[in-house]
Amino acid sequence: MTASCARGASALRRQLLLTAACTLLGGAAFAQAQAPSSVTADFPNRPIRMVVTFPPGGSADAVVRMLVPRLNEKLGQPVVVDNRPGAGGNVGLSLVAKAPADGYTLGLGAAGALTANVSLYPQMPFDPVKDFKPVAMVAATPFVIVGHPSIGARTQRELIALARAKPGTLSIGHGGNGTAMHLSAALFAQMADVKLVEVPYRGSGPAALDAIAGQIPLALVDLPASLQQIKAGKLIAFAVTSAQRVPMLPDVPTVAEAGLPGYDSTGWFGVVAPAGTPAPIVARLNAEINAALGDEQIKTSMRNLGAEPAPASTEAFEAYIQSETKKWAQVIQTAHIRLD
């Protein structure tokens, strides 16, 4: 990894990487020592279904499809992508929760479905803790707070001062109710002690377009939707939401650096299996996914999409899900966010 990429890696990635190497070395040894030989020898002996909780063409879907050829080669069986978007990821993951726990049905879920939805929805079709076994973290996706040049602020501190001077008058667009962008905007408002009018859009792109056009003064969006317009001067980038700066915008500070210490919020997604999936199978899948994430060509392609590879052990991924669940439950409760 280059020095630039190292600086741009998020705190999430650094935290998870601490245990990734142990998994790569220890997972196979555990499988050999603990598993019946039939389990390790026979898996997989037929295609694996990967339920992706995003529509085709999005960044998460694109990242999975980057990994598939490598996984096909290493596993010796095809990994078939099955896109099942809807209800913030609940539709696709409910299928995974009900599938046999044999390693042949996996799900690619995001922060929302795996951590926040349990606090957002009055009823859930699955229990994120009891119904899944975390397999592998895949990637983190930092967001950026942007504004139209006419807003009258050039730094995050100036923006916060403006919002405090005009409470409840500045609107901020985001990628949709219950999304990681929505929750990131809510966390920003709470930590900055400002009142913003949140405007949900159907995705990051439309929110960025309205900010570019001046229809809304602010937006919290992903990098692919805003990067070129930031570089062209059509949007002001106040801060990135991750704990570390990103290589694509090296001069843009983090929210924490710009005046809100402790702020750290990224979108992320990872692979889960039905609860009860045998540990040797989980270890094998984790090792192969981590190995694919370490491929230099795959890493470059992911970063071009604004996603940072985040290989991790199953234990680190599971612990991260638990900590994120507690974090967003508090943010959601404070902001009185509820989805039907």
Image (tube, rainbow, N blue to C red):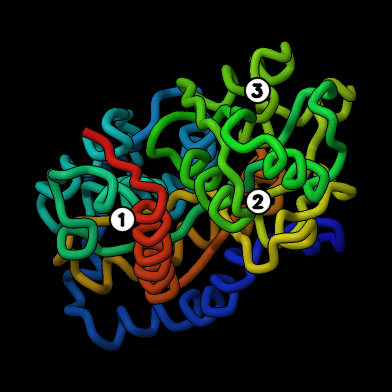
User: Toward the viewer: 34 or 145?
Assistant: 145
Residue at the spot x=76%, y=51% of the render? 246
**172 relative to 254 in the view: left or right:** left
- Across and down, in percent, residue 138 comes to 49, 54
Disc nearest the viewer among 3 and 1: 3
Instruction: State the SS at label 1.
Output: strand
Most foreground residue, 103 or 20: 20
Q: Answer few, some or many: residues within 10 Å of disc 2's Cα (few below 14, many 20 plus, some between 14 and 19).
A: many
Give SS at disc 3.
helix
Residue 313, disc: none
- Marking on residue 208: 3
Of helix, strand and loop, which one carries label 2? loop
Q: Position of residue 59 (x, y in %)?
A: 54, 33
Residue at horizontal 82 percent and vertical 44 percent from the top:
158
Q: Are marks 3 and 1 in contact (CB under 8 Å)?
A: no
Callout 2–callout 3 Cβ contact below 8 Å? no
The tag on residue 241 is 2
Mark nearer the N terminus (1 vs 2): 2
Residues at marks 1 and 2, CA–CA distance in whole angstroms: 25 Å
Q: Is residue 27 above or below residue 47?
A: below
Quarter of the image where one finds residue 103? bottom left
Residue type at tag 1:
Val
Residue at the image point whose x is 25% and y is 56% from the top? 273
Disc assigned to residue 272: 1
Q: Amino acid at mark 3?
A: Ala
Residue 334 visible in image: yes
Q: Residues within 10 Å of mark 3 (few under 14, many from 20)?
A: many
Q: Is residue 68 visible?
A: no
